Amino acid sequence: MRITEKDVLYVADLANLELTDQERQRMVKDLDSILTYIDTLNGLNTDNVTPMAQISASASEKTPWREDSLRPSLPHKEAMANAPATDGDFFKVPKVIER
Amino acid sequence: MDLNNLTIAATRSAIADRKISASQLVQDFYGKIEAEDGEIHAFLTLSKERAENQAAKVDALLNQGAPLPRLAGVPVAIKDVMCTRGLRTTAGSKILEKFIPPYDCTAVARLEAEGAIILGKLNCDEFAMGSSNENSAYGPVHNPVDKTRVPGGSSGGSAAAVAAGMAVATLGSDTGGSIRQPASFCGVVGLMPTYGRVSRYGLIAFASSLDHIGPLAHTAEDAAIMLSVIAGHDPMDSTSANVPVPDYVSEMKKPVRGMKLGIPKEYFGEGLDAEVRSGVEAAIQQLASQGAEIIPISLPHTSYAVPTYYVIATAEASANLARFDGVRYGYRSQKSQSLAQMYRNSRDEGFGAEVKRRIMLGTYALSSGYYDAYYLKAQKVRTLLARDFEQAFQKVDAIVTPTAPTAAFKIGEKSDDPLAMYLADIYTVTADLVGIPGISVPCGQTKTGLPIGLQILGKHFDEGTVLRVAQAVEQL
């Protein structure tokens, strides 16, 4: 096994995921088998290949910039409507700073 | 009125000729959904009030003698990854169980502007991650052709609703095959347009360099009509292309005589079910007898597409899904004392197993020390895959392959083996990686009556050619 429980804990921390013990053990096994499959890419020489960072065909002319102009934004009340907790003006979260 | 196999043209003329009112048609469709969707579970939310209001508008237009728009009174339904103002949108996830979007997805707004009636929102794999619809937090969709089997995924509800006659056409999304593979499994037509052809404004993001919106329908003509309505530049999506939208219906009706169709040997190798192979090969023979020139080709990097896809798609997903933090919208865990713990618990309780697996894989591939080995490597292979197609399209007008290696599999058959599930997309992922259009069209059945799908891939922005070959296959 190349993936250990320690790796899974480290990555879960980066991804802000709290995994249960059971989920963690399953994740070790699943990531290990998927990464082993992904390793088949190493059989391919890509030394002089440019990475594809842009998928749009001839991006510059076909996906023009829009004017940077003022336009109406979502009303405050509507933007807040789906929040799990607000005080009416702001999103409420658990206390961040102890005093 | 028989709602099964009802086309857009038939619906529109029935309303224009006053054989049925739009309002009555909506009631008939809801009657069918109530009678049949209990066993299929294609719909997650019905939008009766919105549908009735829209139908009343269409009926009023008709009574005034005003010209009817292109989709006047046509009942459609929308995969639940597209935002609909005031109408719950879940992405098949518990984390968005109560999410009510404050705006409409552009594709949805364009359908309604042409008189289409939105019946409701369709079940799908959570955040469109899956190939069987078993990853929905709201339970699986059953294939209308055989209810013990999956409808495919992730747009399983979109394919099943059309197949069962519960909507005339639907919208789905395709990131690695999620329109074409379920279309194949349910025996309907599913079209993934070129990257940039259809605005993604209002589509809940999975992998931004791979996500596409497209139609599922009974016929290639209906797919062409739907695409004509939803395609075109949208200033709200910076990746939407400013390319004129042709008349896809007249493009589609041209004959295939003299066309050059490429058959890539890599799509007919090991792993392809024998019955699927013979169904697709028989259709290719028929295309040849209609005067198309059949040309054997090679797309040499094909076997690298699925591993490339699972690096790029999961890396992008890990970034896109970072927004679900229990603060601005979505589910919040109630059992946390600190902010950091609230993020972690909300995400753990809100996301399902496959979504967490992909976030973990994507985070790993982007993490310090692994970025070059995985993400950069995959981006380079993506370039090689694009070159395969550039070279092929110098010799051929379109490429014909099976859509999926097998017909629909049983519910539960692959749900415990993520890698086996990923291979269900082996013939579809490459088009997403390269940004070219693809369609799945039915071409016969297996001995047990399961639909077989044939895939046609075309050049960038050449949906007309793809639809033309699809129409020819349909008429065999």
Image: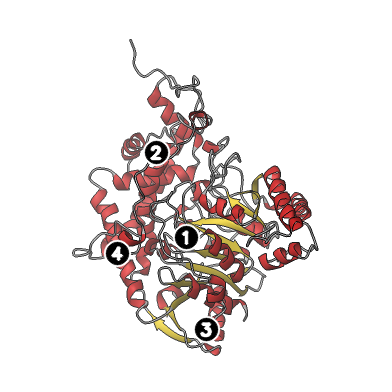
Q: Chain of mark 3?
A: B
Of residues B282 and B469, the one drawn nearer to the viewer in this rendering: B469
Which callout, 3 or 2, points to the residue nearer the camera? 3
Residue B98 in view: yes
Mark 1 vs mark 2: tell me if same chain: yes
Residue type, mark 1 in image = Gly
Residue at 54% in and 49% down: B125
Q: Residues within 10 Å of mark 2 (few under 14, many from 20)?
A: few
Of residues B432 and B65, the one drawn nearer to the viewer in this rendering: B65
Which callout, 3 or 1, points to the residue nearer the camera? 1
Q: Which residue is mark 2?
A: B322
For the residues labelled 3 and 1, the Cα–Cα distance comes to 26 Å
Q: Chain of mark 1?
A: B
Question: Do labels 1 and 2 touch, CB within 8 Å?
Answer: no
Residue B453 in view: no
Mark 3 vs mark 2: tell me if same chain: yes
Residue at 34% in and 13% down: A98
In what element is the residue under mark 4? helix
- Taking B297 as reference, is B302 above or below it? above
Q: Position of residue B230 (x, y in %)?
A: 53, 58
Residue at 49% in and 27% down: B333
Residue type, mark 2 in image = Ala
Question: Do labels 3 and 1 touch, CB within 8 Å?
Answer: no
Q: Position of residue B454 (x, y in %)?
A: 54, 72
Q: Residues within 10 Å of mark 1 (few under 14, many from 20)?
A: some
